[in-house]
């Protein structure tokens, strides 16, 4: 029986979970640096300890209404499929689940291909997503973003 470590967070009062090992770190909300490449999916970049990291609009990718970043929000930095980040309303905790506790995505009807399944905990439904698939669906070209980050870093010097 295989166990999964899942990182829980909320967006718009709904709880979500992703593989803990995809999470690099979580930081309090910071200012997003806007670039000419900003759009409804790519919000800009953040500077984390001198490293520029793209910010993906996970709300748009999950069909959740837009909300501007708030001082109480958090930024989750992930390493799949490339180093990137997204904004969440709240972070909760890490849970350990067995595969038997998860309702498989093939058992539910949903248009989002990133859903791996869901689990019900204390009466709440928590959707388990493959963050790599969510970020990939943004069609962001990491090479282009990296070039933009290098150019911005050079401008800061």
Image: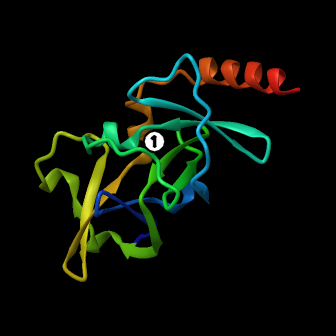
Residue 10 spot, x, y in % from top left = 36, 62
Above or below, 45 against 38 in this view is: below
Which residue does the image show at 49% across and 24% down from the upper left?
140
Q: Secondary structure at mark 1?
A: helix
Quarter of the figure with residue 23: bottom right
Left or right of 11 on screen, residue 31: right
In the image, 99: left or right of 79? left
Q: Residue at x 61, y 43 (%)?
A: 31
Answer above or below: position of 94 versus 54.
Answer: below
Q: Position of residue 57 (x, y in %)?
A: 42, 38
Q: How many numbered circles are shown? A: 1
Graded by Cα atoms within 10 Å as few (under 14), some (14 to 19) or many (20 or more), the crowding at tag 1 reads some
Q: Quadrant of the N terminus?
A: bottom left
Frontmost residue, 81 versus 2: 81
If the image is split into quadrants, where does the C terminus sit? Answer: top right
Q: From the top left corner, tell me how far across and down residue 52 is, in percent.
A: 70, 36
Tell whether 3 sits left or right of 64: right
- Above or below: residue 101 compared with residue 74: below
Colouring scheme applied when the structure was drawn: rainbow
Residue annotated with mark 1? 132
Q: Residue furthest right?
A: 157
* Residue at the extreme left of the image, as rendered: 109
Where in the figure is residue 138, as x and y percent of width and height? Answer: 40, 29
Residue at x-position 26% and y-position 40%: 113
Residue at image position (43%, 23%) is 39
Quadrant of residue 99 within the rendered picture: bottom left
């Amino acid at each position: 029986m295989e166990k999964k470590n899942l990182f829980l967070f909320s967006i718009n009062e709904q709880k979500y979970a992703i593989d803990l090992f995809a999470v690099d770190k979580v930081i309090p909300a910071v200012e997003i640096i806007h670039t000419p490449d900003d759009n409804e999916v790519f919000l800009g970049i953040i500077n984390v300890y001198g490293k520029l990291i793209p910010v993906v609009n996970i709300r748009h990718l999950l069909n959740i209404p837009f909300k501007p970043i708030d001082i109480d929000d958090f930024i989750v930095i992930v390493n799949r499929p490339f180093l990137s980040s997204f904004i969440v309303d709240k972070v909760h905790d890490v849970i350990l689940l067995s595969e038997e506790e998860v309702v498989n995505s093939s058992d539910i009807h949903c248009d989002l291909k990133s859903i791996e399944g869901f689990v019900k905990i204390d009466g709440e439904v928590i959707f388990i997503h493959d963050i790599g698939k969510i970020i990939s669906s943004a069609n962001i070209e990491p090479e282009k973003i990296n070039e933009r980050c290098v150019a911005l870093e050079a401008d800061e010097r």
